[in-house]
Image (cartoon, rainbow, N blue to C red):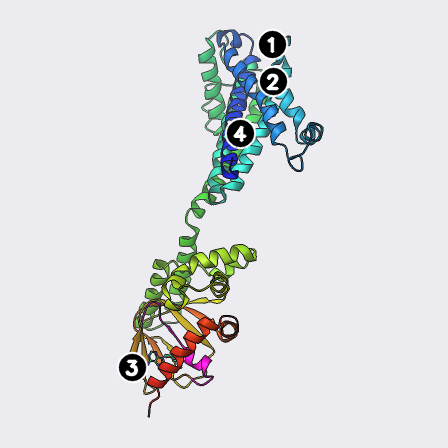
């Protein structure tokens, strides 16, 4: 069985066990309420859950990491003992069957530890939805707590004795929810000190829960689209700056257009900032994924070795140019070359006006200064918005030394273009 299938099966099983534990968590407190159990026979349900829990002990024994496939039963048992064997065994014992209604039944609720562990694992696996899951699991525990508190209220005879089981439960639930949500109509009031103390506890709990839920929802809403939120913050700061420094409206519009372009092209994140936190292997994977368009589009790289593509993907830095930007000025010293992912650029004669060629997706430029070690032979100006990747001199030299085939192609192109752009 593949590893992925194993994980899916394991999760399905854990989900089933969690459902079983939840069922017990619902019915065991009800058993404790005198007169309640006889009216609500849930024995069959308890029996099914018991079988499930017994099997689960076996499943967990198999699953325990015994340090290699050869782990003997003894080793497994010892490791499982440290990982909560007692908890699973206690949860699997149907105490009520042996000793009748007994507080020992509550020991079976220890299985809820496994539910919490499962929820924790789910949140770790679903990092993107971790906040939503946190709230969902919180609501789960809240519902369980509301149920337990309602059962406690019935046990304290807070909910009209003499009524049928369902009505008593509903009225206890009504009291619990109205107290916990701080609504408190006052139509059900505590009688006697025990009930009063109980009500005080529930009120204090209710206020805490309320704050927690509101705080969580605020975090989730703020995190629904963090990229967009960060982008809008940036744009707002920039707008404030532009107004404050009274930039000319034409320049303001160019800046706004630039940001709109960044957003459309998904270039808002400062990638290097985020990638720096990751291990090298993951960074390479992500870089390869993000730069696959340029690598696939540049004829020069087609058929290049994997090693070359990996190396160059890490070294190339993305650059965005606006229409009219001069990426290269003729006569200046050049320390980098560029590959075009998207956009159109014009090659200008040293007079800065005459267009001698246009370059577009998949082309590269700026290589002459590096190959022939001379000042820039021509100017290059963006005619549209352009996405480029920049390769600096140091990396370029590595390419020359380690990948002679590709270096030869770049050199050929440099000499050919240089011949064409030598102006009188
Ligand atoms: P470099 O001299 O470093 O800077 C200007 C770049 O423009 C140059 O490298 C070439 O990549 C490019 N270039 C120069 N002349 C031409 C041409 N005739 N056709 C296309 N590109 C050119």
Distance in Å between CA atoms under marks 2 and 3 = 93 Å
Dot 3 falls on a residue whose secondary structure is strand
Can you tell which mark lies on residue 342?
A: none
Between 239 and 4, the residue placed more toward the observer is 4
In the image, residue 282 above or below residue 411? above
User: Badge 2 is on which residue?
Assistant: 194
Q: Nearer the viewer, mark 2 or mark 1?
A: 1
Which residue appears at 44% of the width and 47% of the height?
Answer: 222
Dots 1, 4 in contact, CB < 8 A: no
Q: Is mark 3 within 8 Å of ligand 1?
A: yes
User: Badge 1 is on which residue?
Assistant: 97
Magenta residues, start to end: 360-375
Q: Nearer the viewer, mark 1 or mark 4?
A: 4
**Residue 219 lies in magenta, yes or no?**
no
Query: Which sits earlier in the primary sequence, circle 2 or circle 1?
Result: 1
Q: Position of residue 177 (x, y in %)?
A: 47, 25
Dot 1 falls on a residue whose secondary structure is helix
Query: Which sits earlier in the primary sequence, circle 3 or circle 1?
Result: 1
Between 90 and 133, the residue placed more toward the observer is 90
Can you tell which mark lies on residue 14?
A: 4
Distance in Å between CA atoms under marks 2 and 4 = 39 Å
Distance in Å between CA atoms under marks 3 and 4 = 68 Å
Dot 2 falls on a residue whose secondary structure is helix
User: Badge 3 is on which residue?
Assistant: 356
In the image, residue 248 above or below residue 38? below
Between 347 and 266, the residue placed more toward the observer is 347
Dots 2, 3 in contact, CB < 8 A: no
């Amino acid at each position: 069985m593949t590893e992925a299938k194993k994980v899916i099966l394991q999760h399905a099983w854990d989900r089933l066990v969690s459902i079983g534990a939840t069922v017990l968590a619902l019915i065991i407190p009800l058993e404790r309420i005198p007169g309640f159990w006889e009216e609500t026979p849930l024995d069959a349900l308890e029996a099914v859950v018991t079988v499930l829990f017994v099997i689960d002990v076996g499943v967990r024994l198999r699953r325990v990491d015994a340090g290699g496939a050869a782990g003997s039963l003894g080793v497994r048992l010892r490791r499982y003992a440290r990982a909560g064997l007692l908890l699973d065994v206690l949860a699997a014992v149907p105490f009520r069957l042996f000793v009748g209604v007994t507080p020992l039944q509550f020991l079976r609720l220890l299985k809820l530890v496994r539910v919490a562990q499962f929820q924790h694992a789910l949140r770790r696996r679903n990092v993107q939805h971790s906040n939503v899951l946190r709230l969902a699991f919180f609501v789960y525990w809240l519902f369980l707590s509301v149920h337990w508190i309602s059962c406690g209220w019935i046990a304290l005879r807070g909910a009209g004795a003499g009524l049928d089981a369902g009505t008593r439960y509903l009225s206890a639930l009504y009291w619990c929810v109205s107290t916990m949500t701080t609504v408190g109509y006052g139509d059900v009031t505590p009688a006697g000190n025990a009930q009063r103390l109980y009500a005080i506890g529930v009120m204090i709990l209710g206020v805490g829960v309320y704050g927690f839920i509101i705080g969580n929802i605020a975090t989730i809403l703020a995190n629904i689209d963090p990229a967009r939120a960060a982008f809008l913050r940036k744009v707002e700061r920039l707008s404030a700056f532009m107004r404050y420094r009274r930039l000319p409206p034409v320049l303001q519009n160019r800046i706004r257009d630039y940001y709109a372009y960044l957003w459309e092209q998904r270039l808002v994140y400062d990638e290097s900032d985020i990638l720096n936190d990751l291990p090298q292997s993951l960074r390479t994977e992500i870089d390869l994924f993000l730069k696959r368009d340029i690598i696939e589009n540049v004829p020069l790289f087609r058929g290049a070795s994997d090693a070359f593509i990996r190396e160059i993907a890490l070294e190339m830095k993305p650059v965005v140019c606006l229409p009219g930007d001069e990426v290269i000025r003729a006569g200046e010293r050049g320390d980098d070359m560029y590959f075009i992912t998207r956009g159109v650029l014009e090659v200008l004669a040293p007079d800065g006006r005459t267009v001698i060629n246009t370059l577009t997706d998949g082309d590269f430029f700026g290589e002459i200064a590096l190959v022939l070690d001379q000042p820039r032979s021509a100017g290059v100006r963006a005619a549209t918005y352009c996405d480029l990747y920049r390769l600096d001199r140091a990396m370029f030299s590595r390419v020359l030394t380690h990948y002679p085939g590709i270096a030869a192609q770049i050199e050929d192109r440099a000499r050919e273009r240089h011949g064409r752009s030598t102006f009188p």
